[in-house]
Amino acid sequence: MIIRSVTSAQIPEILAIFNEAITNTTALYDYEARTIEKVTQWYDAHVQNDFPVIGAFDEADTLLGFATYGHFRPHDGYKFTFEHSVYVRTDARRRGIGEKLLTALIAEARKRPVHSLIGVIDADNTVSIRLHEKLGFHFCGKIPQAGFKFGRWLDVVFYQWINTIFTIY
Ligand SMILES: CC(C)(COP(=O)(O)OP(=O)(O)OC[C@H]1O[C@@H](n2cnc3c(N)ncnc32)[C@H](O)[C@@H]1OP(=O)(O)O)[C@@H](O)C(=O)NCCC(=O)NCCS
């Protein structure tokens, strides 16, 4: 397995991973599957902003998962805080890929002006919560009934990693 940056060639594979999560899970709160145009816009914006999009690839160069981050909130004062995400294909889980991707994302974040990464996680997503706790993210808040999907209210929790070395004076 190889960890490296994804290119625009992987957009269809990213689309498939997003849409599996949208259709079958509450990992994403979208109702409608994304389109190739929407994911292309998303990818281009990440490239323009120098946000890493890191992929895990098998020997055949198939994308097994990816991790990335983007703006946390679109206001100047949040410019050092980012919301990240990590997705692994359903048939590639429990092989350490999510952990490798998130570890690589943190390493990239350390090279950039990033003070904080925030995981915005559905409160029932214990797998993601355990992954984040394992990598040193700390629980920093919960919004009950912040979401509504599949006919029920969803609580959302926030997990934070702070780059204590990156400081602004
Ligand atoms: C969350 C996700 C990225 C984990 O990826 P993964 O490659 O399966 O995880 P890993 O094999 O690297 O496991 C790393 C750690 O995560 C936790 N974990 C992973 N799968 C787990 C499971 N089924 N049950 C409990 N803990 C689990 C464990 O702490 C594990 O460490 P361990 O192996 O020492 O126990 C993956 O399940 C996924 O893509 N889920 C759907 C999308 C999603 O929820 N993304 C996060 C949105 S915030």
Image (cartoon, helix red, strand yellow):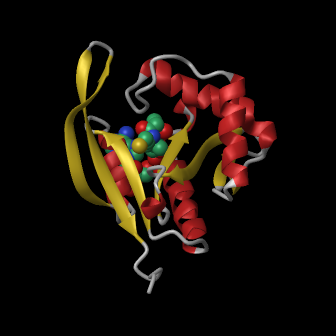
- Quadrant of the picture in which ligand 1 is shown: top left
Judge whether 136 appears above or below 140 on screen: below
Q: Residue furthest top?
A: 151
Residue lying at 57% horizontally and 49% vertically, measured from the top left: 67
Q: Residue furthest left?
A: 144
Instruction: Out of 160 and 62, give the one closest to the viewer.
Output: 160
Residue 94 appears anywhere in the view: no
**Residue 161: percent from left, percent from top:** 38, 65
Judge whether 120 appears above or below 111 on screen: above
Is residue 26 left or right of 16 when viewed as pictured? left
Residue lying at 39% horizontally and 63% vertically, measured from the top left: 135
Residue 161 appears anywhere in the view: yes
Judge whether 137 appears above or below 46 on screen: below
Residue lying at 66% horizontally and 49% vertically, measured from the top left: 46
Judge whether 14 appears above or below 163 on screen: above
Instruction: Out of 113 and 139, give the one closest to the viewer.
Output: 113
**Residue 81: percent from left, percent from top:** 45, 61
- Give the number of marks: 0
Is residue 88 left or right of 54 when viewed as pictured? left
